[in-house]
Structures are given as C-alpha cells and as structure tokens.
C-alpha cells in the first residue's frame, strides 16, 4: 500500500492504495464518485475521462499513485452545486445524450476541447471527441451540444 | 375562480427537453456498477480460451487458498443448484449450462467462477484456476457446419442444424403441412430477367457503452431475492430468476436501474444473472458481477450473421414476378432467449414494401463454435431489408431503370392496406410513394445524380444509393411473443394533485420519462413538472414486459394513455359531485377542473385530487382515491417504413470509402417528441453505417474472435459520419389510439443496402454487381485494381 494525496473536486483526499489501483477505481470505489464510468479496458472509449491538472485524461489509463499530488476534476465537480457548466447545459438543451453512460466522459473531453479552442468548427469538434465512443446518439446531437456550449462560454476555465 | 395562470402548452408533438438528463449530465445516475451493499462480494468468471474442447481438468486449489476468496465453483458445482438455461422460442434446443460442464463450445464460455471480497482479488484468483482441455474440431463456417464439417457441436443436433429447413411464403400452409411451389416456379419460368446473388449480412458486436452487470441479494429469513441487472426487461428477469431458483415470483424483485444502452443484447436473460442469484442464495450474501469490455465481446450476444441466397424474377419493365430467399443463420454455439426467432423475422419481412405475386423463403439455423447470437437493433428486419433492397438495386441496374422508379412500380399501394403479405404479416398502414417522393425531394436526387456524373467526369469514384424499408414494430400481440405481447401502465393522481405513473417498458436511453409525461400532461392538462414516470423496478411497477422491438411508445405509451383515461374519468366524477355539474360537462384545463361554459366554477386540479382522498361526502357508488391501471395488447404489430439515400466516394488510390451524404425519411406514424425521435434515428443510422462500412466480428479458424476489443473492433467515432439529413412523413397506425408506430430500430434498416448500393454505383465502371459488407478499403482496392476481390 502506498500513501497518496490527490485534490479531487477541490478537496484534498488522502488514502493508502495498492500500486496497481487505477485512478478510475480510486475515484469510484474509494471516493464514491461514480459519475466517472468504465466502458472498456483498453483505453479507447473515454467514458472514464476526467481532468487532471486541467487537462482531459482517461482515468482507466493511469494508476492512482501516478496522480499523487495532482488536481482532479470529475463530472461531479465540473460546476458548483446547483449549477450546470455550459457544456452540461448544451448536452441537455441539444439532446446530446440518450443512455447517459458515455456522457460524463464525453462532457469532460468537450470541456477540454473548448478550453483549447473556444470556437471549433464541426470537423474540429468531431475530431476533438475522437477519444470518446457513444453508441446511442450517432454523435450529431453531441456535436450540436458542443456547438451550443461554445456559443455560451463553454471554453471558460474550470477549477 | 378566475384563471390568471399561464395557458399550458400542448406538449405532444413538441421537442421537449429530456427530464432524464439533469441527473445524467451531472454524473448522478445510478448504474449497476454504482451499487454497493453491505457485505457484498465480487464474482469473476474463468472463461474458456478455446472454442471447442472437452474439459479434462480444473484445478481450483491455488485460487481457493488465496486470502479473501470466499468460494470457487466449477460448472459441476453450479449444475447442482442450477438447471440448464431455458429459451423463449418453441424450437428444440440442446442443454445449455450457465457454467460449462465437461465440454466448452465457444471461446468465452464460463468454466468456473470465484467469489472474493474485492474485484482485483477475484480476478487474481480466477487467473490462478488452471483448466486443461482436449481440443475438438472447431466449427466456424456455417455452410460447412450444415454438412457436419468438421464436426458436430451438440450430439442430438446432426449436421449442426439448430433449425432445419423451415419454408415460408406462397403455397405454404401455416403448419408447413403443404408446400406448393407451382406459383414460384412459374414466376421464374416466365421471367424476362432474373437476379441471383449470395449475400452476407455479417456478424456484429452490439457494444452498449455500459457492459452488463448484476447485483444479486438473497436475504435469508425474508427469503427474498433482489436482483439489479443491466437489462432491458426486468419483469422477464423476475420471472426467470424465480423459476430457476425454485421460488415464487412474489419472492423476487428485479431492478433495472440506469441502463447504459441495450440495443437488443440486454433482452436475453444471461448465465451471469442466474449464477449470481444462485450463488447469493447459496452463500447468503450479496453478489456483484461486472462485465469487462473484453469479456463483453465474447459473453454478450452478437447480432446478425445471416447468409441470403436471393433470386428475383422480373419482367423487362421492372415488375417483379417472384422472389426466392434461402437463408442460413449462423447462431453460434447455443440458443439464447430469442435466438432462434430472430432470423424468422427476416423471413417474415422478406418481401419488404413490394407486392410480389410469388415468394419462397427457407430458413436454416446452424450451430457454430462462436458466441451465440440474439437480438441486435433491428433483429432480423435489417437483414431482410438488406437482401431484398440489394436485389432490387441489382435489378434496377440490370434493366437500367432508375432505382426509385423500379421501386415505385412494385410498391404495395395505399389502397391495399391493411395488406396481407404472403409471409404471414398484415401491414397496418402505409403510403410508400409519399415517403419515396419526400426522400427524393429532401436529397435533391436529380441534383445528386448531376453531382455524381460531374465527379465521374473528373475521374472520381462517386456513387448514389437508395433503399426503402418497412419493419415490424410495436410487438405484440401475445401470439407473437412468448412473454406475452402487452404492456402495463398505472396512473395515480396523488393527494396533492401531482401524478405518479408506472410503465412496464424499462428504458435505457429512449427517454420514456419525457415522452410519457408529455402525454399525461396533455391528458390531464397539468404542468409536466407535476408528473413522475417510474420504471425498471418490479417492486414498484406491478407488471410489464420490457423495452425492445420499438414497442415502448406504441404499446406501453398506449397502456399509460388508457390508464390515464380511467383515472381522468373517475376524477371527472368527483369533480362533477363537487361542482354540482354533469360529468359530461367537466373540463380539464390549465391545471384546473371546471364546468363547460362556467369558468368561474373551476377548481384547482389539486383541490379535486384532495377531495377524492377525503371524500366528504363520498359520492354514491364511488370508491375513494385516484389510481388505476391498464394492460394494453395491440391487435396487430405496426409497420413503420421509410427511404434512405446516401452518396459515397471511394478513393481510387487507396480504396477508402467516405460517406458524403446520408438522407433519411422515416414514417413512424404520429410522433410524441420529434427531438427524441431524431436522436433514435441518428443512433440507428450510425449502427447501420457502422455495419456497412467498418464494423465486423471476425473469427479465425480456431474460433478466436479476432476483433475482440475496442482496439480491434471498429466502433464508429464522430468523425466517421457526415451530418445526417432527416425528415418525416406521417402515416398513423390504426393499431393504437396514439397512432404511433415505433422508431427505435428504423435507422439500421435502410442504411446498409443504400450504402452498399452507393458503393456498387461508385465502382460501376469496373463491372461490379455486388459487394459484401463491410466496405473494407482493401476489398474495394482489389475491385479497382482487378485483383479478384469481388463479392
């Protein structure tokens, strides 16, 4: 067991974990932050995407011990309680989700995309979410959601 | 009272934002893997890594000795407490143990399992189990399998025939007692032109983004089983879990919490669900199993995998005289719940939208050493559409008739509905030319032809494809489903005037919480915020069947509408008593209940609700309360239809295809929420385009799934698609009072033939007549370069 300290959604979290524990399992099992999902075991699907030190990353592809000392934002911490981030609002307004399983990861990737490029064109959006699979929507309403978020300040920094 | 409240808008037919979304976009949904129970243990399966073999030994000693391991069981252990798994179709079926006993028949079949305190540990222990096998011949090619080559998988099924030749169509008695081929033979004898083509509708992996998962909790003393599962149909799960555990249905509560997509692959009741329940009962502790993605590739049912030998007989003017379709379905190693029934839907829909005088279809279903198939979005109908539409396209090309015109000449006409097909279906309603014309207009077909021709002059390989479809949706009636073909709804007006409604259709992305609330809001004229739709829990929802076959709106929506009607009538009776008016004059309007022509007498909706629960005085002959239910069984299925058009370009140098345009006109009858309908069509199109262009489950000769992870299986990404262009025609169904037909699967039907036809069109200069899916660049490159890659 190794000691770690990770700032998750603004709170410092200390724990002792097995070196092999994946960050996504630390978030889900230790912190009960179950909004971050696991959709594959080969780092393709992106359902587990979170922000580590402000950049999107797949939480299934990093050990919790590697995130020691970093700052992690999950879907639960994307907006202050009772508020929605513009990307979340965009997904709601534009029917950007159906079953909702890929959604948290998709939203986190979109947040990162808009931080880098606040006004992406459609091709840039489609390429920008290339690391995230959705089986329900055919992606069109997700593209619309990100376009809508871009119009409403979705590129603003998150904590 | 005077109504200063804003007038409530009518919601049915409006693009209402989903009420499911706030929790899901904030990561607050609860999927099975999010459930933790005190004392819960984790179950992990050891699965066969070979496709066919006799188990010669299983050594569990190392696993048993690991710290934190609660139990290790082999197939023989499980067989003592769990009978072979039942199926839901009337076909004969070999014994199928949830955990293999003696013989494994596909790579991925469970052979043992571990229960441990932690999932990582359970996996370590499963890895420590050592299984040895004596390999048996691996049966992969279904057409060889039919001859018993290279071996036989189930001893009582010679030549691996799960379903031996079943005939259908012209001159076949319903019980197969009489088969008269005269009409079909004459049609082909009199033909001026014939088309003959073998086509493969290949195997796919459904890949809902949430893998499956189960939590089973037997509570000794209470003697109740609660089972959470990522399923499309918790009520069927409840029935099966009770039967297989030898307990009553009153002892089982099945819960489908948030379910992350299903696409048909979560209809089946799986080995893992049964095993978790019996292990929980055996150990007296909650048991959790969560499927890995790589596990899901082999453990969750696959879809499609039907070979069609398709023949058309026609006159030179394009009138089709006869159709023959010989179907061979590769169903994998075992029959699952609906496996054997899926290809029968291909037979049922063989003639598509056409009035064909003579039809013969036959169906053979074959066991192979692969993961079993079952429903996958469209389930038999995309295969039918693909076969008949590709054949029609080949005929159009042969006769040099415009593909739209050829279809027009063969369509079932509006005045022929209800139309009894020779395959046994009765199409409820349709206006196919209207949808065809709408699609040609939406796509600007003439403009696309000019664009294509111009591109060709520039040396580009550009093609156009058009396909028409009809599907069978809104399943029942009960004669068509072993589970019963009805749905259940209950509506309760609470004491405060808010409405709680339950539905047996358990959604997994379809948005029923929104569409059903839209209906009830209009029915009672109350704000949608005052309505809650509950689903997915047999402890809350009294009865139900489930969500599949594009049936939620048509069947479950109607059940709620009918239940709502009963409650509304009773509420009107209370209002009539309170307002001293005739029941016939009671009007529900803008959150009030009043009397026609006397707006000042209107009372708030909640006031009448309160009166119904404290009825002083109780009107004569009435019971207190406002709650009622309805079972709705439709008299017939619905038959939505539509037309898909695509434009595709193939890179002359690399063979890489690129979809330039996808136009879909769908007629699903009346639409409750066009925004949600569009989402459903988009998703269906994406899966159809995925099948046509990049997705394929590939097995090698050893029976190993070569595309067994997201690294190898081409899941479509956002950049694989153009912007879909949708429009609709509306032909309501007479089968239910809503006029809604269903739309969940539509997108998968027209898309595959229209894309392949576009590819054939693009490569027409090379004389190619048919290309099997998927459109792998290498395959197309070989056609371009004359290297014999045709078909």
Image (tube, rainbow, N blue to C red):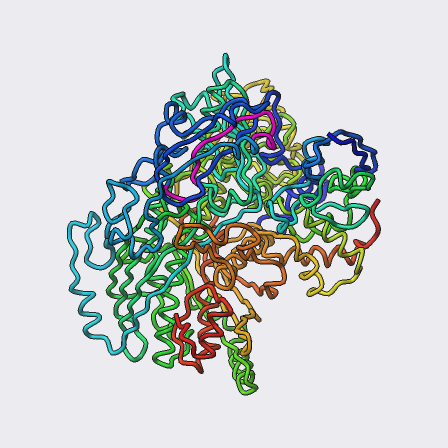
Q: Which residue ends up furthest to the bottom in the rendered image?
A: B457
Q: Residue B259 or B306: which is nearer the viewer? A: B306
Quadrant where the image shows the C terminus of chain B:
bottom left
Residue B536 appears in the picture as rendered: no
Q: Residue B130 or B326: which is nearer the viewer? A: B130
Q: Is residue B539 above or below residue B366?
A: above
Q: Residue B759 or B401: which is nearer the viewer? A: B759
Residue B660 appears in the picture as rendered: yes
- Residue B1 placement, left or right of B632: right
Q: Quadrant of residue A65?
A: top right
What residue is drawn where x is 68% and y is 32%?
A29
- Residue A158 placement, left or right of B127: right
Place of residue A87 in the rendered image (x, y in percent of width and height, measured from the top left): 74, 51
Q: Quadrant of residue B19?
A: top right
* Magenta segment: B105-122
Question: Is B488 in the magenta?
Answer: no
- Residue B128 placement, left or right of B87: right
Place of residue B756 in the rendered image (x, y in percent of width and height, measured from the top left): 45, 68
Place of residue B121 in the rendered image (x, y in percent of width and height, measured from the top left): 59, 30
- Residue B359 placement, left or right of B555: left
Place of residue B8 in the rendered image (x, y in percent of width and height, measured from the top left): 66, 45
Q: Quadrant of residue B422?
A: bottom left
What residue is drawn where x is 45% and y is 56%?
B698
């Amino acid at each position: 067991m190794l000691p770690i300290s990770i700032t998750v959604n603004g709170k410092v979290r200390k724990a002792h974990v097995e070196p092999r524990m994946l960050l996504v399992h630390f978030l889900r099992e230790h912190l009960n932050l179950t909004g971050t999902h696991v959709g594959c075991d080969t780092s393709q699907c992106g359902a587990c995407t979170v922000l580590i030190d402000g950049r999107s990353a797949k939480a299934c592809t990093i050990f919790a011990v590697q995130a020691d000392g970093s700052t992690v934002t999950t879907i639960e911490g994307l907006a202050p309680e009772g508020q929605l981030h513009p990307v979340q609002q965009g997904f709601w307004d534009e029917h950007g989700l159906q079953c909702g399983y890929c959604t948290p990861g998709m939203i986190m990737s979109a947040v990162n995309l808009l931080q880098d490029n606040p006004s992406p064109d459609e091709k840039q959006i489609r390429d920008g979410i290339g690391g995230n699979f959705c089986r329900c929507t055919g992606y069109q309403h997700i593209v619309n959601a990100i376009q809508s978020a871009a119009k409403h300040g979705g590129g603003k920094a998150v904590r | 009272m005077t109504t200063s409240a804003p007038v409530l808008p009518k919601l049915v037919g409006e693009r209402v934002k989903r009420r499911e979304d706030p929790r899901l976009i904030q990561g607050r949904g609860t999927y099975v893997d999010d459930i933790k129970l005190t004392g819960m243990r984790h179950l992990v399966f050891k699965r066969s890594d070979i496709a066919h073999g006799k188990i010669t030994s299983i050594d569990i000693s190392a696993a048993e000795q690991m710290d934190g391991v609660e139990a290790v069981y082999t197939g023989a252990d499980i067989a003592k407490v769990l009978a072979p798994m039942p199926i839901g179709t009337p076909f004969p079926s070999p014994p199928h143990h949830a955990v293999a006993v003696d013989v494994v028949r596909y790579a991925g079949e469970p052979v043992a399992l571990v229960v441990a305190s932690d999932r990582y540990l359970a996996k370590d222990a499963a890895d420590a189990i050592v299984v040895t096998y004596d390999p048996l011949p691996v049966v992969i090619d279904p057409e060889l399998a039919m001859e018993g080559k290279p071996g036989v998988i189930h001893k009582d099924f010679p030549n691996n025939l799960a379903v031996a030749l079943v005939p259908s169509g012209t001159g076949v008695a319903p019980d197969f007692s009489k088969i008269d081929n005269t009409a079909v033979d004459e049609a082909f004898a009199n033909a001026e032109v014939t088309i003959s083509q073998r086509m493969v509708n290949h195997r796919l992996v459904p890949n809902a983004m949430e893998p499956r998962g189960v939590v089973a909790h037997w509570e000794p003393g209470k003697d109740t089983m609660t089972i959470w599962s990522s399923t499309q149909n918790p009520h069927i799960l409840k029935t099966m879990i009770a039967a297989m555990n030898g307990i009553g249905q009153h002892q089982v509560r099945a819960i489908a919490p948030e379910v992350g997509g299903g696409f048909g692959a979560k209809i089946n009741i799986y080995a893992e669900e049964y095993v978790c329940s019996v292990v929980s009962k055996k150990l007296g502790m909650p048991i959790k199993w969560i499927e890995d993605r790589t596990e899901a590739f082999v453990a969750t049912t696959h879809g499609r995998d039907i070979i069609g030998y398709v023949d058309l007989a026609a006159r030179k003017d394009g009138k089709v005289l006869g159709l023959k379709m010989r179907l061979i379905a590769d169903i994998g190693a075992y029959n699952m719940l609906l496996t054997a029934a899926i290809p029968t839907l291909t037979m049922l829909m063989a003639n598509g939208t056409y009035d064909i005088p003579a039809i013969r279809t036959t169906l053979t279903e074959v066991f192979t050493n692969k993961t079993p198939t079952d429903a996958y979005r469209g389930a038999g109908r995309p295969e039918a559409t693909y076969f008949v539409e590709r054949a029609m396209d080949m005929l159009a090309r042969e006769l040099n008739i415009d593909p739209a015109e050829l279809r027009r000449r063969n369509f079932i006409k509006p005045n022929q509905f209800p139309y009894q097909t020779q395959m046994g279906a009765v199409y409820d309603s349709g206006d196919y030319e209207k949808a065809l014309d709408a699609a040609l207009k939406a796509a600007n077909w003439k403009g696309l032809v000019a664009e294509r021709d111009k591109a060709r002059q520039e040396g580009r390989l550009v093609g156009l494809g058009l396909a028409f479809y009809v599907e069978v949706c809104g399943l029942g009636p009960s004669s068509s489903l072993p589970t019963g073909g009805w749905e259940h709804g209950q509506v309760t007006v609470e004491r405060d005037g808010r409405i709680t409604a339950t539905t047996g259709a358990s959604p997994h992305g379809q948005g029923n919480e929104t569409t059903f609330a839209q209906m009830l809001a209009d029915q009672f004229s109350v704000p949608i915020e005052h309505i809650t739709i509950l689903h997915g829990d047999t402890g809350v929802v009294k009865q139900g069947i489930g969500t599949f076959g594009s049936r939620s709106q048509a069947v479950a929506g109607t059940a709620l509408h009918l239940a709502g009607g009963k409650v509304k009538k009773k509420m009107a009776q209370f209002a009539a008593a309170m307002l001293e008016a005739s029941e016939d004059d009671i009007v529900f309007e803008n959150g009030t209940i009043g009397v026609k022509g006397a707006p000042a007498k209107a009372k708030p909706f909640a006031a009448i609700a309160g009166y119904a629960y404290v009825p002083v005085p109780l009107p004569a002959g009435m019971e207190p309360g406002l709650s009622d239910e309805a079972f709705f069984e439709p008299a017939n299925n619905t038959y939505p239809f539509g037309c898909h058009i695509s434009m595709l370009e193939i890179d002359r140098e690399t063979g890489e295809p690129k979809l330039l345009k996808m136009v879909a006109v769908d007629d699903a009858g009346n639409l409750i929420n066009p925004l949600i309908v569009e989402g459903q069509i988009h998703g269906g199109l994406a899966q159809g385009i995925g099948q046509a262009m990049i997705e394929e489950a590939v097995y090698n000769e050893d029976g190993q799934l070569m595309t067994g992870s997201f690294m190898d299986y081409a899941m479509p990404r956002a950049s694989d698609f153009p912007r879909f262009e949708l429009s609709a025609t509306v032909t309501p169904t007479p089968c239910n009072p809503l006029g809604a037909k269903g739309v969940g699967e539509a997108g998968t039907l027209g898309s595959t033939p229209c894309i392949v036809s576009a590819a054939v069109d693009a490569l027409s200069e090379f004389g190619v007549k048919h290309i099997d899916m998927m459109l792998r660049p290498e395959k197309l490159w070989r056609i371009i370069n004359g290297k014999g890659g045709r078909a």
